[in-house]
Amino acid sequence: MNQIICIAGPTASGKTALSIALAKELDGEVVSCDSMQIYKYMDIGTAKPTTQEMDGIPHHMLSVAEPQEDFSVGKYCQMATPIVDDIVARGKTAIITGGTGLYMDALIRGNDFAPCPATGCRERLEAQAETEGIEAIIAQLRQVDPESADRLHPSDRKRIIRAMEVYLETGQTITQHNKRTQLLPSRYDPVWFALEDADRQDLYDRIDRRVETMLEAGLLDEIRSLLARGIPEKCTAMQAIGYKEFVDALSGRSSIETATALVQQSSRKYAKRQLTWFRRNPAIHWLLREQGQTNIEILARARQVLATSDK
């Protein structure tokens, strides 16, 4: 039996339930691969599994960062890799579960990330972006790394600045760095699963219901508590879907009803992007959920794949 399993898929597709069920059967531990569940105090809006849902299964990489912290895929891999190695060294199964494809791919490949020394370069680029606009940074980036300039959306300020910073600090573009990294053999060779609904509308309906359930569970109070802690509205964590919209509502810039509809719409669009990302991975075994199909039936199909895997 392979000691590393990846469970991917869009939001609200049932990844948590499947990962816990497999962990019980395979003496496993779950390693969360979600770029928002890493943050402390952000439980309801990120659909972080509760203690009851975990059902005694150890979970890692949950609530490991402060909400105002500038987290990254590199930091995630730095923290998660020794955890995965330790689980495997103890003879258990590491079940890497989540919907953040960038983090999951980087962890499995074992990417070495471009250095990020504290020289003040990033701060200078941030200041330039504030005074001249992000377009000025994109124009600079296009001169040295046109591929990244074309690939990155103007709204992706963080990665635009990061790409320019890497070039200024190393003399090598982030595109060159990434291509070199992709030529290296992967650190891990897992069995990959991804969940998808046969009827996309079933997923969308489940997403809509989940947002309503989050509100019933106290999402607005969770956001009020974050703001009371002094967490800035504009920090990365508070820009997550399900937080920024309700921050606007709580601040009087929109209504709760408008925010709810916007969160549901944004979550559906995010699910579509997640599916697009994971479909690029030819190693994934897709577990297609037919309408009315239970988690037990999905688990049975996953068992079949694992039983026939030659890994």
Image (cartoon, rainbow, N blue to C red):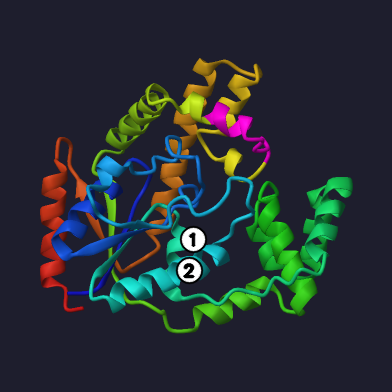
Task: Name which quarter of the figure residue 82 lies in.
Answer: bottom left
- Disc 1 designates what residue? 102
Question: Looking at the image, is 306 positioned above or below residue 271?
Answer: below
Is 137 in front, or is 107? Answer: 107
Question: Looking at the image, is 60 positioned above or below residue 17?
Answer: below
User: Of all residues shown, which one is farthest toward the right?
Assistant: 131
Q: Is residue 74 left or right of residue 299?
A: right
User: Of all residues shown, which one is farthest toward the bottom?
Assistant: 184
Q: Which segment did they paint magenta?
A: 223-234
Image coordinates for residue 284, horizontal then vertical, percent: 29, 64
Image coordinates for residue 218, horizontal then vertical, percent: 43, 25
Q: Tell me, yes or no, whether the two marked residues, 1 and 2, touch with CB atoms within 8 Å.
A: yes
- Disc 2 designates what residue? 106
Residue 123 is one of the magenta-drawn residues: no
Image coordinates for residue 196, horizontal then vertical, percent: 28, 48
Q: Secondary structure at mark 2?
A: helix
Residue 225 is one of the magenta-drawn residues: yes
State the separation of the CA atoms marked 1 and 2.
6 Å
The residue drawn where x is 68% and y is 37% is 232
Image coordinates for residue 126, horizontal then vertical, percent: 80, 54
The residue drawn where x is 64% and y is 54% is 70
The residue drawn where x is 42% and y is 24% is 215
